[in-house]
Image (cartoon, rainbow, N blue to C red):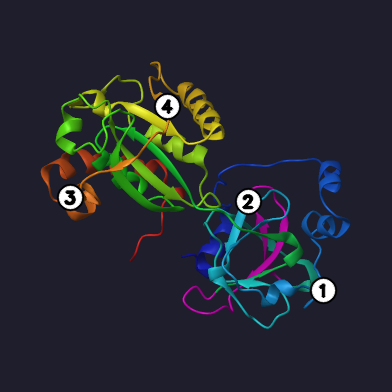
Amino acid sequence: MLKWRDVIQFANHGNPTPDRRVEKTEAEWQTQLTAEQFRITRLKGTERAYSSQMCNLFEPGKYACICCGTPLFDSGEKYQSGTGWPSFTQPVQDNAVAYHKDGSYGMIRIETTCNTCDAHLGHVFQDGPAPSGLRYCINAIALKKVTSEIQKATFGGGCFWCTEAIFQELQGVLKVESGYSGGETESPTYRAVCSGQTGHAEVIEVTYDPALISYEDLIKIHLTTHDPTTLDRQGADRGSQYRSIILYRTEAEKTSAEKAIAEVQTLMDKRIVTEIKGLDVFYPAEAYHQDYYASNPNKSYCRAVIDPKLAKFRQQYMSKLKEQAP
């Protein structure tokens, strides 16, 4: 959770790296935005207090940048501040918002901007409610309410105990379930899959919020947290059930998977052999396989294999991790 000291640190020493950047000319922004949206977001204007109904709307959902569509705030962090502008206690991610010292009007304030496209949002103050103590005072015109349907992604890359443990830690991931897919046998068991005769791979089904993490990001993380260049093998685990595979539900997912593989391939010395296949059926694995690492952290396999993978993953994708409990 961000606190005032973090805001000051960012304002004084540089902002966190955004997940992506969007840059357009002033003329391009003027074409895309209304005159008032342009005045607020690109010319650092301020809307009139109490001019928007957004102050009084608290239904579930996300609020994204009106310019680039980046998710910035969640309605769960929205509160009635009585100031006349929509107010939030936290952004959806630490790197969603950028902070800058603002010396206009004879006072020092901390301006907030979209960290993706530099759109002016408003200011942040240290008079908000506990536990953060922050009040993000945001122009309603700079935001748009977005609703997203929860989606699922299915892929495998070795033992599903490992992949499940990794993806459970990502922001935007709501659920991870281990299972089997990609083969022909109906309702396979773990023993049958391990025989290599079912055609199925050990996979995970990830339930995620696309407003917080994209399908393409999930695939890139998948490809860079196992070895996609080894055929039917991950480390000491050998067999077709351990193959690298992405099972798509739509043509758009197939295209995203192909694009992600092409991008990750530029980082690899060997050819990626990940299979891309349409999803037929996902079969959940037996109950004792679910949440395996969380339930068995001291097992020898978890200590020797999963712990090192998790440590490397956490270091590589620190900005995308869920906030850990103190």
Identity of the residue furthest to the bottom in this view:
82
Q: CA distance from mark 2 to mark 1?
A: 24 Å
Say whether disc 3 or disc 1 marks the residue closer to the N-terminus: 1
Residue count near mark 1 (Cα–Cα under 10 Å), binned few <14, some 14–19, many ≥20 = few
Residue 103 location, quadrant = bottom right
* Residue placed under numbered mark 2 in the picture: 70
Q: x%, y% of residue 264?
A: 47, 26
**Residue nearest the viewer, comparing 195 with 132:** 195
Q: x%, y% of residue 5?
A: 51, 67
Say whether disc 4 or disc 3 marks the residue closer to the N-terminus: 4
Residue 160, compared with residue 86, is above or below; it is above
Disc 1 is placed on an element classified as: loop
* Residue placed under numbered mark 4 in the picture: 277
* Image quadrant where one finds the C terminus: bottom left
* Residue placed under numbered mark 1 in the picture: 48
Residue 96 location, quadrant = bottom right
* Residue placed under numbered mark 3 in the picture: 288
At label 1, the amino acid type is: Arg
Say whether disc 2 or disc 4 marks the residue closer to the N-terminus: 2
Mark 3 near mark 2, Cβ–Cβ under 8 Å? no
Q: CA distance from mark 4 to mark 3?
A: 27 Å
**What is the magenta range?**
108-133
Residue count near mark 3 (Cα–Cα under 10 Å), binned few <14, some 14–19, many ≥20 = few
Residue 197, compared with residue 9, is above or below; it is above
**Apparent side of residue 179 relative to residue 31 in the rendered image (left or right):** left
Residue count near mark 2 (Cα–Cα under 10 Å), binned few <14, some 14–19, many ≥20 = many
Q: CA distance from mark 4 to mark 1?
A: 53 Å
Q: CA distance from mark 2 to mark 4?
A: 30 Å
Residue 32, compared with residue 259, is above or below; it is below
